[in-house]
Amino acid sequence: MHTADAVETIQREMTVFARRARAAAGRMHPELSLVSYTLLGHLEEVGSCRATDLAAHYALDKSTVSRQVTALERAGLIERRPDATDQRVQVLHLTQAGRHILAQVTESRRAAFRERLADWPAEDLSRFAEYLVRYSARPGPGRAE
Amino acid sequence: MHTADAVETIQREMTVFARRARAAAGRMHPELSLVSYTLLGHLEEVGSCRATDLAAHYALDKSTVSRQVTALERAGLIERRPDATDQRVQVLHLTQAGRHILAQVTESRRAAFRERLADWPAEDLSRFAEYLVRYSARPGPGRAE
DNA sequence: CCGAGTAGTTGGGTTGTGCAACCATGGAGG
DNA sequence: CCTCCATGGTTGCACAACCCAACTACTCGG
C-alpha cells in the first residue's frame, strides 16, 4: 500500500468510524451517553478536576460541559465540591454510584470490543493501540483545536 | 503492552476520536458536514445508488438519509433520477458541482491528514490503515448494526 | 478599589438522529 | 383483475449534543 493510499484509507476509516460510533454507543448504553461515559472515565483517570479542564481536554464548549456536569450530578454520578482556594471553582469527583456505573459500562464495552478483536494476534493489537495513541497525541484533524 | 490493555486503549482512543471528529469536521468544512461528505464520497465510489442503499450501508435511518439527500439535492450536489424498472426508486447521482466540491474537500482533508501523519514511517502508515480496514470490516461495536 | 480576566450558568439556535405514521408503488395469490 | 403485504421514500415529532453570546460571581494585579 502506497503512503498516499494509506493516508486516504486512514482518513476514510477514521471518519466513517466516527460517524458510526456515537450511534452504536447510544444503543449499547442508553443510560450513559458516549459523552457522559467519556467524561466519567476522564474523571476516574485523573481523580478530580474542574469543568473547565474537561472542556479544554475535549475541546468542548464550557456550556456543553456545564450541562453535562449538571446532568451527571443530577443522576448522582458525580459531585461538585467547592475549591478551598478559589470560590469560582467547583471540583468534580466521582461518587460511589458513578464509579459503579462506570465500571459496569466499561466492562460491557470492553467485552464487546474484546469480542470484536478476539481473532487479532496480540502483536497486532498492541501495535494498533500504539498507533491510535500516537495519532491522538498531537493536534490536527480529528482533534478539535 | 498486554492484550487487555491494548483492547482498552483501542476502545478509549476510538471513542474519544469519534467524539472529536465530528466537531473538527464541521469546523474544517462548514459547507459540507461529515455525513454529507461521507454520503457524497460513497456515491462517487459506487457511481450511483438508492437512498435505501445508503441507509443500509451506514446504518442510518431512512428518514435521516432522506433529509440528507434532500439537502444535497437542494445544494445542487446530487440529482435524483427515476428508476426505469421501479417507480418507487430514485437513483442518486453526483452532479458536476457535487464532484467538484467533493474533490476540493477531499483534497483539503487529505492534506490535513497528511500533515498530521507526516512524520510517520511509511510502513507504520500502511499497517495503521490496514488495521483500520480490518477493524471496520466486521460488525460489532463501532459499526452500528 | 477598580478593571481585566476566569469559572460556570443560561437562553437561544442548529444539526444529526431515530421512531412512527404516512403515501405510493410493486408483486404474488386468489 | 383485485387484495394484501412488502418496500422505497417523506414528514411530523422528539431528543441529544453542540456552539455562541450574554450574564453572574469571583480573583487578582495595579
Image (tube, coloured by chain):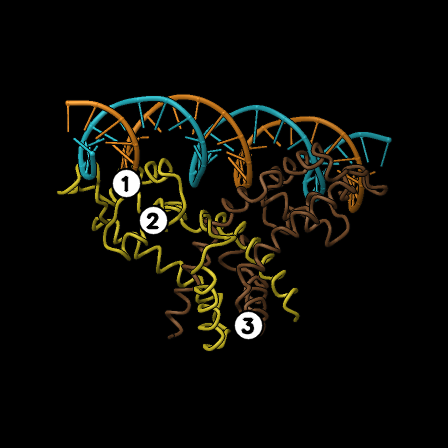
Chain colours: A yellow, B brown, C orange, D cyan
In this rendering, the answer to whether A15 lies above or below A91 is below
Rendering quarter of residue A73: top left
Eye-nearest disc, 1 or 3: 3
Chain-order first, disc 1 or disc 2: 2
Instruction: Give me the disc on residue A39.
Output: 2
Give the spatial CA distance, label 1 vs label 3.
Answer: 46 Å
Name which quarter of the figure residue B113 lies in: bottom right
**Horizontal placement of B28 versus A83: left or right?**
right
For the residues beneath circles 1 and 3, the answer to whether they share a chain is no
Q: Disc 1 vs disc 3: Cβ atoms closer than 8 Å?
A: no
Question: How far, Cα to Cα, is label 2 from label 3?
Answer: 33 Å
Q: CA distance from mark 1 to mark 2?
A: 14 Å
Give the vertical position of A40 relative to A74 (above or below).
below
Outermost left residue: A84
Q: Which residue in the structure is indicated by mark 3?
A: B121
Task: Identify which residue, B26 or B143, lies in the foreground.
Answer: B26
Q: Amino acid at mark 3?
A: Pro
Determine whether the residue tagged by mark 1 lies in a helix, strand or loop: loop
Using the image, name the chain to which the residue with label 1 belongs: A
Q: Which residue is tagged 1? A: A75
For image coordinates 33% across by 47% down, the residue present is A54
Chain letter of mark 3 equals B
As helix, strand or loop, the secondary structure at mark 2 comes to helix
Amino acid residing under circle 1? Ala
* Rendered view: B79 above or below A114: above
